Image (spheres, helix red, strand yellow):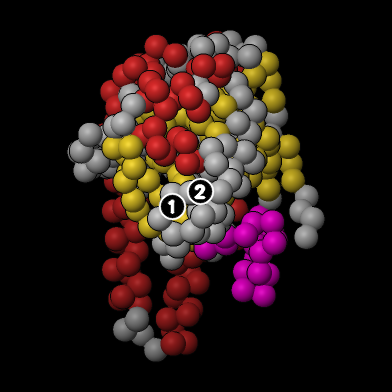
Amino acid sequence: MAWESLSVPRLEGVSQERFMQHLYPQRKPLVLEGIDLGACTSKWTVDYLSQVGGRKEVKIHVAAVAQMDFISKNFVYRTLPFDKLVQRAAEEKHEEFFISEDEKYYLRSLGEDPRKDVADIRKQFPLLEGDIKFPKFFKEEQFFSSVFRISSPGLQLWTHYDVMDNFLIQVTGKKRVVLFSPRDAQYLYLSGTKSEVLDIDNPDLAKYPLFSKARRYECSLKAGDVLFIPALWFHNVISEEFGVGVNIFWKHLPSECYDKTDTYGNKDPTAASRAAQILDRALKTLAELPEEYRDFYARRMVLHIQDKAYSKNFE
């Protein structure tokens, strides 16, 4: 099935001033080219990463299929030495494996204690720190995390949103990224922060009929590209070949707005969580009414939310 997609704009040689003053306030995805990322785009080969990354144990996702589903958990967590992970992820077929000879691997680096510490490639992989330069397009005190990502060829990550702004730095390899606006959330069949629609190119429209209304924004990333993903924008990432990436997350809102227990950058802001809890209590109260009245007052509540909370400043 062919889907119409809007191309994510690509700009080369964007300065910090231009980004912050003119592009960032638009709150739309953007591919930046020609950013100085250091030597990583040429140095981070399979052999180099295996040697320099060493035998540090890392927790990984292992899947027998290409489309990973975080809702049904169609993958298993396993642990491998970092050098073994890199070597296996670069292979199409494996002599050593957990599930099958063509299984897929995905690393999303974690902090030393994932319950308390955020991921930071500079701390977890200090020997690689000198190879990469982070784009200086936000204030240092806004920095939240830097996440090392390694993916097998063909791996597709579920559609989800994050609550912080981030740069996806494509260090090596190629990715295809499909994004959806926060304003199209009602078409994505959400379960928490994730969409139930796994196959976004050939969705089951009998099961997900509204999905066809969601506007798609699409881009291809090559080594050296940096994709700006604004907070709340849904994104689905397909690794077209073995690749290494780094996500830089930073706080778009004041620090006190975020959940202090969040080490991944994907827990809703505290005010949003409180509002959701209040809504749940309101729905339980509505359940005390007969169906006809419950339906009527629920519709009134929806209209009230639309009138008071929906913004007219976005498409």
Residue 140 spot, x, y in % from top left = 35, 16
Asked if the residue under mark 1 is in contact with the one under mark 2, i.e. CB atoms within 8 Å, the reply is: yes
Q: Secondary structure at mark 2?
A: loop
On whether residue 198 falls in the magenta region, the answer is yes
Residue 76 falls left or right of residue 255: right
Residue corresponding to mark 1: 97
Q: Which sits in the foreground, 310 or 25?
A: 25
Residue 285 spot, x, y in % from top left = 30, 76
Q: Which sits in the foreground, 24 or 176?
A: 176
Check the image and report above or below for 18 versus 178: above
The magenta segment is 196-214
Residue 144 spot, x, y in % from top left = 34, 28
Disc 2 residue type (three-letter): His
Residue 28 can be seen in this image: no
Disc 1 residue type (three-letter): Phe
| Label 2 Cα crowd, 10 Å radius (few <14 / some 14-19 / many 20+) | some
> Does the magenta stretch mainly form a helix, a strand or a loop?
loop
